[in-house]
Structures are given as C-alpha cells and as structure tokens.
C-alpha cells in the first residue's frame, strides 16, 4: 500500500524530530510493504518572519487530500505564541475537524519515573482530549484595552455534538481496554458547559454498562495523576484540561520526549494529524539532543490509523526494546548523553527483516 503523508516539521526541535523519524518510518514501511509518499510543507515561524503568515491562505485545504499529517512543533521565542499557534496548528485541528485528541501515557520498562516506587508497566492510561472547542473555541472573545479598567473576555464553548464525539470515543476505548473511564470536569465552578458535559457522560454511560465511570474534578485529577496514576485506564477531558493533564501524564511516564499524540478526524472526511505532545523546546533547539521517541511513537499511532497495525507494532517493539536496554543510547531528558541521530540509528539496527 502507498500513502500520501503531509509533513509539517514546523519550528525548533520539530524539525529535528520529524527529520530523524522519517528513515525509521520508511524502514518499517519497507518491511511491511508500505510506501509513504511525503509532501513537505515549510510552514512555520521562519515563514512568518519572512512573509508575514505561518501558512498560505489555502494551507488547510492543501492538506485535505493527504492520508495523514505528521507535525513536529510550532512556537518561536521571538513571536507571541497566540500568533504562531493560531496561525498554523490550531486552525488545522479545527478546520480538519480533528475533534478527538488521543494521548497515551505509558511508563516503559527501563524508564525512570519521577514518581517514587513506580516501575515500567505501572502506568498505562490514555487521555481523550476534546480538541476543537471548549476553552479553545475562540468564539465571542472581546477586549477593552488601553483604559484604566482593562477587560478581556475569553469564552468556552461546549456543543452537544463535540462533547458526545469525544466522550463516545473514550467509552469505546475503555471497552477495548480495562473498562474504566474517568470523566474530568470542573462542574463545581463551571455551571454551564461542564454540567452539560457531565450529563452527556451520564447519558452515554447507559449505552456502555460494561464501562465503570468515575468522576473527578480537574484539580483532584491533577493530584491523582501523581498520587495514583496506576488507577487510570481511560480519561476524558475538555480541551484545556486535557492539555494540562497530558503534560503531567508525559512527565510521570518519564519525559515530554516520550509522549505521542493523535488528532483524529473521527468522521474520516479529512486527514488526522500526528504529533508529539511537546512543543518546539527553544531551550534545546539546534543542539541535536531532542528525544525523537515521542515523534516515532506518534508515527506508530499514524500507522494504526492508516490501518497498518503490523507496522505500528514493529515501531513500538523497537522503542520498547531500546528503552529496556541499559546500554542503548539515550537523550539527556532520559538521563543519557546521546543525540537524536544516535537514538534513531540504534532503532534502525534493532529492526528485524
Ligand atoms: P516544550 O514542550 O517545548 O518544552 C518543555 C520542556 O520539555 C523543555 O525543557 C524542553 O526542553 C523539554 N522537551 C520538550 N520536548 C523534548 C524532547 N523531544 N526531548 C527532550 N526534551 C524535550 O514546552 P514550552 O517550553 O512550554 O513551549 C515551547 C514552545 O512550543 C512555545 O512556543 C509553545 O507555545 C510551543 N508549543 C507547541 C506545541 C505544539 O506544537 N504541539 C506544544 C507545546 C508547546
Ligand atoms: C499541545 C500544545 C498546544 C495546545 C498549544 C501549543 C496551543 O500545548 O498540543 O499540547 O494547547 O493544544
Ligand atoms: Mn500542551
């Protein structure tokens, strides 16, 4: 099979980790009879600095014909983040209707968690984050600035359709996993959107009697990600809460450099987008030491969504094997002193014919 993949390396370490991952995706593809045809888009902050926009006006439409999108990261220290992100990544998620963001958190064998007493295999959950609305809806925002009493209004939007879509995806995943769903809201303070959200979870749970539903307020959930991460199986949360919780999920599983993510267009009308959870990491950009594994594991999620589970399995197998090997190269975020390229070269060596 052959697939058309749009590449958006973006900014900072986004370039490093996408470039590093491609030979590995190709090598796995070769072994599984899969050809990935790439179209690279040089969109991002450099383009903004030269031409005044992050991507062309018809950028999102140019992505539509592809089978999937692989994105590195977006963000530049000299440009406000709301300009770069609202100029590139957020409109892609929104306009390609990638309503469900899936972010697994797995503590692999051989990786040290900052949590005392946790070892490989002890943490294994997945967060389903609502991905196009909620606190990121950007609807009805207003500002009254330049006066003594300045005011800015940032609204949050929860539609029944958007909420049902992510909640249903989470129930389906729970049914396939350990049958446990944690619904994270802040409905004690947010009486409108979050109460609708809770009602939708309660309604859908009637359709999934085999799934046990737990309710947690987001502040308590943040605590419990640290206190009892082993207790989570599938977590469902709004856009902002899912964003915050998945950074916590990444670090308790060892590093931001290990956390993959899939932005899924569940109705299949547009391509899904795969990207590491982390950002452009200006603090280490250009040093060749970014951990490529979050992007490699995002590549495994990409293969899964293309309907190529054998390729996904191969990729995950070599990553697991490498992390479990105390003599394998590791980037500094995992306590090693190797660079991005050495990690990928070692993974290539581990691929079986
Ligand atoms: P970040 O994820 O870029 O970095 C946070 C910390 O984690 C840094 O210390 C960084 O060095 C480390 N880190 C991240 N990825 C790593 C990797 N692969 N290997 C080793 N270490 C890694 O978050 P930030 O510093 O808050 O944001 C930097 C920029 O990225 C900002 O402009 C932000 O808006 C943007 N951002 C973009 C995305 C995205 O494109 N999806 C996600 C998050 C942040
Ligand atoms: C992420 C990022 C983005 C988000 C930012 C950069 C807008 O933090 O993908 O987790 O909040 O979705
Ligand atoms: Mn984030």
Image: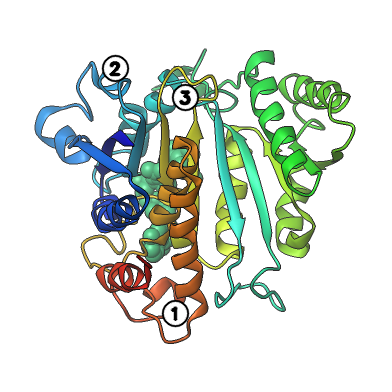
Q: Please, which residue is most extreme toward the left here?
A: 50
Crowding around mark 2 (Cα neighbors within 10 Å: few <14, some 14 to 19, many 20+) is few
Residue 84 location (% of width, % of height): 30, 34
Quadrant in the rendering for residue 94:
top left
Give the Cα separation between the discs numbered 1 and 3.
50 Å
Which element is circle 3 on?
loop
**57 left or right of 132 in image:** left
Give the Cα separation between the discs numbered 2 and 1.
42 Å
Vertical placement of residue 268 versus 230, above or below: above
Q: Quadrant of the C terminus?
A: bottom left
Vertical placement of residue 226 versus 57, above or below: below
Crowding around mark 1 (Cα neighbors within 10 Å: few <14, some 14 to 19, many 20+) is few
**Mark linked to residue 299:** none
Viewer can see residue 219:
yes
Residue on which the image places disc 3: 148
**Mark linked to residue 335:** 1
Q: Looking at the image, is mark 3 or mark 2 nearer the viewer?
A: 2
Q: Please, which residue is most extreme toward the bottom here?
A: 327
**92 left or right of 102 in image:** left
Residue 215 location (% of width, % of height): 84, 40
Viewer can see residue 73:
no
**88 left or right of 208 in image:** left
Q: Earlier in the sequence, mark 1 or mark 3?
A: 3
User: Is mark 3 in CB contact (under 8 Å) with mark 2?
Assistant: no
* Number of numbered discs overlaid on the protein picture: 3
Q: Is mark 2 within 8 Å of ligand 1?
A: no
Q: Residue at x 19, y 22 (%)?
A: 56
Residue 140 location (% of width, % of height): 52, 12
Q: Residue at x 45, y 54 (%)?
A: 297
Residue on which the image places disc 2: 61
Residue toward you, 139 or 145: 139
């Amino acid at each position: 099979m052959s697939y058309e993949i749009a590449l958006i390396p973006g900014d900072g370490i986004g370039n490093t980790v996408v470039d590093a991952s491609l030979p590995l995706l190709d090598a796995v593809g070769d072994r599984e009879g899969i050809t990935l045809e790439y179209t690279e888009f040089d969109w991002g902050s450099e383009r903004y600095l030269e031409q005044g926009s992050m991507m062309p006006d018809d950028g999102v439409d140019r992505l539509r014909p592809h089978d999937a999108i692989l994105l590195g990261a977006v963000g530049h220290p000299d440009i406000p983040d709301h300009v770069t992100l609202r100029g590139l990544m957020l409109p892609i998620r929104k306009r390609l209707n990638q309503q469900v963001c899936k972010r697994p958190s797995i503590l692999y064998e051989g990786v040290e968690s900052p949590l005392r007493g946790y070892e490989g295999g002890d943490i294994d959950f997945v967060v389903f984050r609502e991905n196009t609305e909620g606190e990121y809806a950007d609807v009805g925002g207003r500002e009254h600035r330049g006066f003594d009493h300045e005011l800015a209004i940032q609204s949050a939007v929860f539609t029944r359709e958007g909420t049902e879509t992510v909640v249903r995806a989470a129930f389906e995943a729970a049914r396939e996993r350990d049958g446990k769903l944690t619904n994270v809201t802040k409905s004690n303070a947010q009486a409108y959107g979050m109460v609708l959200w809770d009602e939708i979870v309660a309604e859908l749970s009637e359709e999934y009697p085999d799934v046990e539903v737990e309710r947690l307020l987001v502040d308590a959930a943040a605590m419990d990600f640290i206190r009892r991460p082993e207790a989570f199986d599938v977590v469902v949360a709004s856009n902002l809460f899912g964003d915050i919780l998945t950074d916590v999920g990444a670090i308790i599983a060892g590093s931001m450099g290990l956390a993959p993510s899939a932005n899924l267009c569940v109705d299949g009308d547009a391509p899904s987008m795969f990207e590491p959870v982390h950002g452009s990491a200006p603090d280490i950009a250009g040093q060749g030491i970014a951990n490529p594994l979050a992007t490699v594991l995002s590549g495994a999620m990409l293969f899964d969504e293309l309907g190529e589970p054998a390729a996904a399995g191969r990729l995950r197998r070599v990553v697991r094997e490498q992390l479990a090997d105390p003599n394998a190269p590791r980037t500094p975020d995992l306590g090693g002193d190797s660079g991005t390229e050495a990690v990928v070269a070692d993974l290539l060596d581990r691929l079986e014919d």
